Image: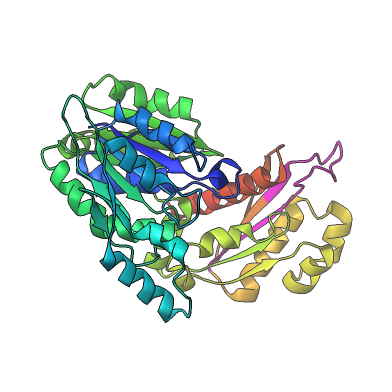
Amino acid sequence: MIVEVLNVGTELLLGEVVNTHAGWLAKQIFPLGLRIARQTTVPDGPAIRDGVLEAFDRADILFVTGGLGPTTDDITREVVAELLGRKLEANQEIRAAIEARLSARGYAFLDRMLRQTMVPQGAAVLRNSHGTAPGLYFPRVSHPSSASPHIFLLPGPPRELQPMFRDSVLPILQEIAQNLDARECRTYRVVGLGESAVEQMVGLQLSSNPDIEVGYCARPNEVDFRLIAQSDILDTVEPGVIEALGKYLVSSNGEGMEASIVASLTARNLSLSTAESCTGGLLASRITDTPGSSQIFNQGFITYSNEAKVDLLGVDPTLLKEFGAVSESVARAMAEGAREKVGATFALSITGIAGPDGGSPEKPVGLVFIALAREGKETICREARFPTDRLTFKQLATQAALDILRLELL
């Protein structure tokens, strides 16, 4: 079945609001055997009509998000009713629900809100427990003269759309898709290889199998290797995938390095501290973004200045004077200082030149030193160069630091 999403909202096209609907909806419908074939975004107003009409010729299921509010630019409801030849009728239950919601918050019901109580004939009302705009569902019409897909009109705000979708839309979709052949998607998170290398190692062989869909998604120093097939087929090929990717495989369920590291440290009752200069706390943030990280992480240090490195980590001032803050010696001292201060099993440190200024022929922009202090073992240090913009530099530097620890834990 062909599924399309039509997003309505001028704010989406102006960049004022980030459109997250397609990604969220895609994850909800995939287990049913449904996948989004196309997403279209149109501004408020007359363009809504063209967007809906174009989808009529292609889609079996159409999700329309936005344009259900009380203002004059919210015309999704009226446009779809017109295209389907349905009259709008006032629904007293919807009005009572809106009035009760407004009253509980100390607001009055305005005449403009009457628009949200209007329901096209033949449409099912989808309750909105988190806003005033109800959703609407129009069953598919297959008559040659008036064919239309299953149409779901949903509110624009995610906090309203998502619970409505889970509570009201999914049960309808389960009926619509009950005879579809659902497939499973498995994502293998790979670090330290580009997508071409992953394809060469394992993807080419699997892509020759017509029962398996192979895909890749590349990010800085990271690749998601994606397989879509029947579960029994994936079970058969997965051992070969894991063996082929070897030490580069972070997880076989799409989890990132942070989750893998936190789980490994927790299972072994080990702990971690961090000391960061050029990354400004991003390494600690990535670790603590992971649920359960409080079990293994209790303190990190952001020592951006030389004085902070001395005062907080106990770095010897002579090392800073002789080798400079961006050096192997200082990276080692930062990691060892952080581990000793906290009493952690491991400590990661990062010091480098994020740019765009501050580099020299001897120490160019993008140079970074990463150290891992280990309880009972010698501290190790790696030099890397990431000559890119500041944000990407920080992402790559923290990624490299996490990978050093991941490989140590292997």
- In the image, 194 versus 127, the foreground residue is 127
Magenta span dominant secondary structure:
loop
Display colour scheme: rainbow
Q: Residue furthest top?
A: 208
| Residue 287 image offset from top left, x and y in percent | 52, 61
Give the image quarter of residue 15: top right
Quadrant of the snapshot with the N terminus = top left
Asked if the magenta segment contains residue 39, the reply would be no
Q: Which residues are magenta?
A: 345-369
Q: Is residue 68 visible?
A: yes
In the rendered image, is residue 250 in sight?
Answer: no
Looking at the image, is 160 positioned above or below residue 61?
below
Q: How many marks?
A: 0
Q: In the displayed image of the protein, which residue is found farthest to the left?
A: 179
Give the side of residue 97 with respect to residue 370, left or right: left
- Quadrant location of residue 220? top right
Instruction: Please indicate whether residue 233 sits to the left or right of residue 409 in the image.
Output: left
Q: Tell me which residue sits at (77%, 61%) in the image.
A: 304
Q: In the image, 374: left or right of 131?
A: right
- Magenta-span inclusion, residue 365: yes
Question: Is residue 238 shown left or right of residue 369?
Answer: left
**Residue drawn at point x = 67 percent, y = 47 percent:** 391
> Residue 347's x, y, as percent?
59, 63
Whole-percent x and y of residue 395?
61, 47
Observer-nearest residue: 270 or 146? 146
Q: Position of residue 73 (x, y in %)?
A: 51, 48
Res 12 quadrant in image: top right
Query: Which residue is located at x 75 percent, y 47 percent?
Result: 354
Residue 103 higher or lower than 153, as above or below? below
